[in-house]
Amino acid sequence: MEKLLIVVDMQNDFVTGVLGTNEAQTIVSDVADYVKNFNGKVIFTRDTHDESYLETQEGKKLPVPHCIKGSDGWQIVPELLPFTNNSNVIDKPTFGSLALSDFLKENDFSEIELCGVCTGICVISNAVIAKATRPNTPVSVLSNLCACVTPDSHNTALEAMKTCHIDII
């Protein structure tokens, strides 16, 4: 069985765009190096909204249009784009991906690793989904390859994942 790496929402809007942070910008080259050298299957999640985003529950709580399908902000960052194709990108309409859960039900992996942004929202959501879908598969989050709005929120999310039996590396 091979390993799986899930790269969460490494998109322009979360790195250099409307919701970008210095923390996210600093991990891009290290994430690209890790993906390039990863010995296993790599998939990407892509936050995907439409023009009516502000009318959604999420849009009412986070009133910043972002990752609008087809926009530059929706695209995977250029450094990671060469590692994507039509079969390894999962579009998701919210923080966690039920399509990711379906993928994990259909495929078995020796272990699952996650990296990406934002640690306290989408990374934690998808890590918990992975652990719930595959409770007997080791699930790890690569802490140095994740970023959040602030270092404190990043660390808080890592601690929360530990309590869900997700390994923090």
Image: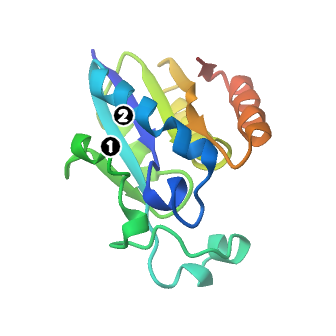
Residue 126 in sight from this viewpoint: no
- Along the line of sight, which residue is nearer the eye, 96 or 29? 29
Q: Residues within 10 Å of mark 1 (few under 14, many from 20)?
A: some
Query: Where residue 80 is drawn, which disc sits there?
Result: 1
Horizontal and vertical percent for residue 19?
60, 61
Q: Is residue 11 visible?
A: yes
For the point 33% across and 72% down, the residue is 70
Q: Quadrant of the C terminus?
A: top right
Tell me if 55 is positioned left or right of 17 in this view: right
Is 113 situated left or right of 44 in this image? right
Using residue 87 as the reference point, say whether residue 122 is left or right of it.
right
Which quadrant of the figure has residue 123? top right
Secondary structure under the numbered disc 1 in the rendered image: loop
Residue type at tag 2? Ala
Measuring 41% from the left and 45% from the top, which residue is drawn there? 100
29 or 103: which is nearer to us? 29
Q: Position of residue 127 (x, y in %)?
A: 55, 35
Q: Residues within 10 Å of mark 2 (few under 14, many from 20)?
A: many
Question: Which residue is at 75% across, 32% downward?
Answer: 155
Looking at the image, residue 5 lies above or below residue 53: above
Q: Rounded to the nearest whole Å, what is the CA distance between mark 2 and mark 1?
A: 6 Å
Residue drawn 26% across and 44% down?
Answer: 88
Q: Is residue 68 above or below residue 111?
A: below
* 142 to 45, vertically: above or below: above
Q: Residue 77: x percent and y percent?
A: 38, 51
**Would you name the residue on which mark 2 appears?**
32
Percent of width and height locating residue 10? 45, 48
Tell me the amino acid under the disc marked 1. Answer: Leu
- Judged from the image, the secondary structure of the residue bearing numbered disc 2 is helix
Q: How many marks?
A: 2
Whether tag 2 and tag 1 are in contact, CB under 8 A, the answer is yes
Q: Colour scheme used in the picture?
A: rainbow
